[in-house]
Image (cartoon, rainbow, N blue to C red):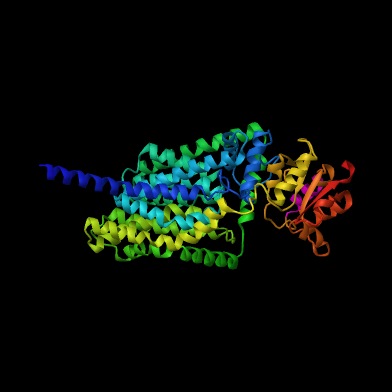
Amino acid sequence: MDFKNMQMKEKYKINRFINFIPVSLVILNFITVIFSFRTNPFSRLLNGHDSSMFIYFGRGISDGLIPYNDMFDHKGILLFIFQYVGILLGFGDHSLGIWILECVFYALSLIFFYKLLMYFTKDRLVSSITIVLFTGIILSSFDFGNYSEEFALPFITIALYLFVRIWLENPTNSWYLFFTGICGGITFFIRPNMIALWIVFCLLLGIKSLLKKDYLVLHKQILYVFIGGMVICLLVLGYSIINGNLKQMIYQTFILNVQYSSSSFSEKLLTAKSFFQFMTDYGVVAFILPFLILLVVNPSKIPKKIRVFHVILLIYLVFNFFTVVMSGRFYTHYFITMFPGLILATGIGLKWLLSQLGLTHNKKIVCILLFSLLTISYSGKAFTDFVKQTNNRMPNEKINSLVVQEAAYIKKNSTKSDKIYVHNISASVYNISGRYSNSKFFKLPSLDYLKFHKLKEEFTTKLYENPPKFIVVGRETYLNKPNLTDLKLDKTVVNAIDENYQVIPEYEQTDYMIFQLKSTL
């Protein structure tokens, strides 16, 4: 009897250990990723280009500035509202507040990655290992954090989970349809070009209902998804009407965003090749290979509706990849929207592959753990480049960097009401000094301003009618006067400096030069 009890206790301990492994792996991924963010409390890096811009928006909203009217950018209003929430959470420490928000959003993404995987694999170890396999490319794509795609990720993942339940279980579940619309509305107003999931699944749900002549089902699907999306639209519309920025929001978020995303076919092709190489470098092509083989083999023992869903998942991945490359720019954070579909495809393929090997339970565990060792080679460099660099950078950028020194100088020699302008550099000088731009063009979007005459004219007018007390410009830009153009408005800025500004001697030889308005000397 004692021997039996001992065996049972030993088996219980082993089972507890085995059950603890999946949780540990997911937590490991979570901790690794959140401490790669520049905003984390131990970070020695200043916020990156986009991150500093978004924080500027959050600060601006908290200080009464109106997005689009007082701050110019082509991202969606909800991204800036999220930044504002982060600013509030920090109680004066902007980076800390944004980090807390990033942790919450990534935790939500992880939870629904796991729920998606468990729905198809019914295997906690396979689900957790699949997430771990993507750690390297997640680190690289998040690129130190605080990007629009990062905040859209949980809503895309939740919507994919809901679409799965709708497609495979209940096509008329009102709550699933409603919250799918909610998630779509939120994603749309973070950045409109990230709604590939809704385009694919809503279209296919509609086709399915039409082919079956289930017009009542189709009506209900359209109605509840529409209501969910309209809830968000009406909230955004109300906010914009109250703040009087509706016209500018429509122009910057939709019209300008389309123009920003335009590119030639050759640029798209080059970007597609770059992203494919990016996937290859981090093993993603190898990870999804079993899923692609499963699609070709298409075993009849798998229920037809599941096999059909596998094809739909592939269609979604291909279409979403097109939206990633359509701007013609190889920015790794664009790839973030691919994760829900890729992670799900990898988990499905891995589970099928293991089932084909016919391994016992214990051998399967060993096989999965050995398979997870692949992540060491794929994730090791990413860990060094993003986690170690973020937290071990020497010298500490937040203490010893030119940006911090110049921000301190500007703060000391100006008042809160004084305006400054930082030309084509990150918005960190604004954020650290606590100052705002002389116009809504605090940071110029990456456009060809020779083609945007009205924007150029408005920028130039503000530069002369409301001149900033200080202008910060790159030394290389300033010294390249004979060759400057207004492609990025460099010529306009340097001409204004030469006419009305004087260089601060101690920053004349630095990478970023500071000029002060002569009338304020």
Q: Is residue 6 left or right of residue 21?
A: left
Question: Is residue 457 covered in magenta?
Answer: yes
Q: Is the residue 61 above or below the residue 379 in the image?
A: above
Pick whichever, 130 or 446, lies toward us. 130
Q: Quadrant of the N terminus?
A: top left
Q: Give yes or no for residue 194 being in the magenta stretch.
A: no
- Give the x, y percent position of residue 457: 79, 50
From this viewpoint, which residue is outermost toward the top? 242
Q: Quadrant of the C terminus?
A: top right
Most foreground residue, 256 or 469: 469
| Extent of the magenta region | 452-462
Q: Is residue 477 visible?
A: yes
Is there any visible trace of residue 312 in the rendered image? no
Tell which residue pokes out farthest to the left in this image: 1
Q: Nearer the viewer, residue 331 or 40?
A: 40
- Seen in the image, is 238 located left or right of residue 493? left
Q: Position of residue 479 (x, y in %)?
A: 81, 61
On the image, the x and y values in percent for residue 518 come to 89, 45
Taking the spot 23% from the left edge, 60% from the top edge, the residue there is: 359
Where in the figure is residue 92, as x and y percent of width and height? 63, 35
